Amino acid sequence: MRLPRSVRRISILAVVLTAVAGLGSCTTPPPPQFPELTFTHLPQIALGVARIEIVDNFTPPSDPKHVESRMPVSPEVALRNWARDRLQATGVSGVAKFIINNAAVTETELARKTGLSGVFTTEQSHRYDAGVDVEVRLEGVPRVTQAFAKAAVNRSQTIPEDASINVREETWFNLTEQVMKDFDPQMSASIRKHLADFIR
């Protein structure tokens, strides 16, 4: 049976609109999904104190160069997860304070070529600098006046000038991940060296 011309036009239009919608969905990738950075796959460090306390002394400045609040997972959040997952209190008195002194990530715009050479060259446009500084300090432990371990890590990463917001967020996530990969062995070694008498 032959369909009326008006019905055929509507059918053709529906096919075209469906195809256009399909093309649009192919050219716009979905935003990336980032996992929570956890450390439960690593052995816990048991300390002879009654509790673990996280002390956050880092407050991101309002300076727009600071991008911590825009990151999928900031170093500050990852550090808190590390303390939660890796430190265990097994004593009856005292406290181990996990003190976050710094967890900054700043953005710096990089100089780029000008003129014709700059037009035909894809350059790195921004650099992100991450720095963390953390102490694990024991307080209220009998016969101990001072006992602490420290770790400080710095990492940098650049992105190209044509980077999409998705690429930028992936760069931020990878930067935090790399910072924590450096931080974990450094802090673990410092605890074992400087707080050896309190490891259970």
Image (spheres, rainbow, N blue to C red):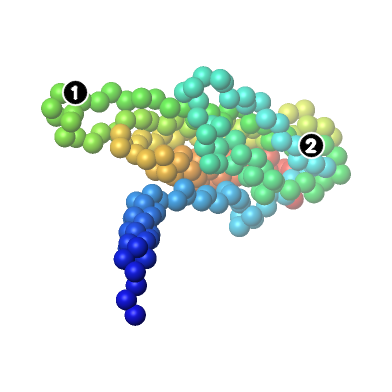
Q: Residue extending furthest front?
A: 4
Residue of label 1: 114
Q: Position of residue 43 (x, y in %)?
A: 64, 55
Residue at 52% x, 49% y: name it: 34
Q: Taking 138 as reference, is 1 above or below it? A: below
Q: Amino acid at mark 1?
A: Thr
Dividing the picture into quadrants, the one containing residue 48 is top right
Of residue 148 and residue 110, the one placed in the foreground of this image is 110
Residue 90 in the figure: left or right of residue 191: right
Of residue 49 and residue 154, the one placed in the foreground of this image is 154
Mark 1, Cα crowd under 10 Å, few <14 / some 14-19 / many 20+, is: few
Residue at 37% x, 40% y: name it: 164
Q: Amino acid at mark 2?
A: Val
Which element type, helix, strand or loop, lies under badge 1?
loop
Dividing the picture into quadrants, the one containing residue 13 is bottom left
Which element type, helix, strand or loop, lies under badge 2?
strand
